[in-house]
Image (tube, helix red, strand yellow):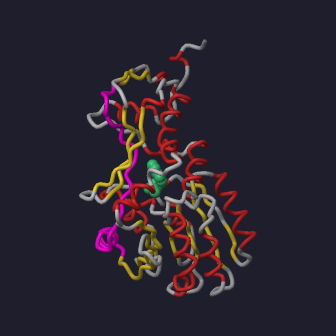
Amino acid sequence: MIARELIAPPPYAEDVQLGLFGSQKTLPCKLFYDRAGSALFEQITRLPEYYPTRTELEILCGHGAEIAKEVRPGVTVVELGSGTATKTTTLLQAFSRRQMRVPYVPVDISPAALAEAQERVQSQCTRVSVRPVVADFSQGFGFLRNIRGRKLVLYLGSSIGNFDPGPAVEMLSQIRSQLAAGDALLLGTDLVKDPSILVPAYDDAQGITAQFNKNILARLNRELGANFDLSFFSHIAAWSPVKSRIEIYLESLRPQVVDLGLLNSRVKLANGERIHTENSYKYTMPMVREMLELSGFSLDASWFDDRTWFALHLARV
Ligand code: TRP
């Protein structure tokens, strides 16, 4: 066996260490999306309880033409965190009905996802020219400066809801600072609704979301050589009306000590103690308006699905 100290720990090791030894234990949500986690998330988007993906698509299908009409012809569509761009083709088709050529710049951290996005868009949208950009948003949005002409920046999927209010405004301000007069942002947000709809979306009957959450522990077992027993944890999704967010935790089902492998440390968990893994904010219209205005945008128009469960907002610089 190779000595532990000879194997370099992964780049997220320090965040794991800090997170597990604070007073409220936490694990970084970026750990969700390894290969197994991304496949589980794909499954989540198709669950009957997980309404956000299909509801946003419903808005894009039903109102894509109106959205395209609000933007001047000649615009370049830039999508932040495009992934494989499954939802975007609908909107791009609406744009290509209004302008001869639609430049589309999908931006993502995953080159594999971008290759799939390019393939999909080129085969489904003939007048759209795709120019993918690989970027890590933690390094800023400087790449926006290199895209010429008027821009419509898409930030779909309510990923904004995974940021606390301060960091969300900080990020939107950073995007804003790379844009010029005439540019716009199309932002997806999930909306506040009855907890009987919100909670099952994050705690489905088939247990796929539980598997997705616990995959963080499985990943630490695989990559750090930790020894989390997944059956000693339960998946928790709790609605906080005060914070207007779904809070996701892993709750320890017994007192236990877990060896963190390459971190050369052991973490002690009490019975019922929770490790926080994610927040998903749900917005009201005043919350959306305030977030956009604090970031230097003005809210121009919003589109909703029939049940007003989700919204797309057009914000101008
Ligand atoms: N961040 C997405 C959301 O808030 C993805 C997500 C769905 C998620 N289910 C989850 C994140 C469960 C953590 C745990 O909708």
- Residue 128 shows up from this direction: yes
Which residue is found at the position 45% from the left and 59% from the top?
A: 159
Q: Is residue 120 left or right of residue 304?
A: right
Quadrant in the picture for the N terminus: top right
Where residue 226 sits: x, y (%)? Answer: 48, 25
Which residue is found at the position 38% from the left and 49% from the top?
A: 237
Quadrant in the picture for the C terminus: bottom left
- Residue 139 shows up from this direction: no
Against 299, residue 197 (above or below) is above
Which residue is found at the position 60% from the left and 42% from the top?
A: 36
Magenta stretch bounds: 268-297
Where residue 298 sits: x, y (%)? Answer: 35, 78
Q: Is residue 277 magenta?
A: yes
Residues 147 and 271: in front is 271
Against 149, residue 242 (above or below) is above
Against 240, residue 28 (above or below) is above
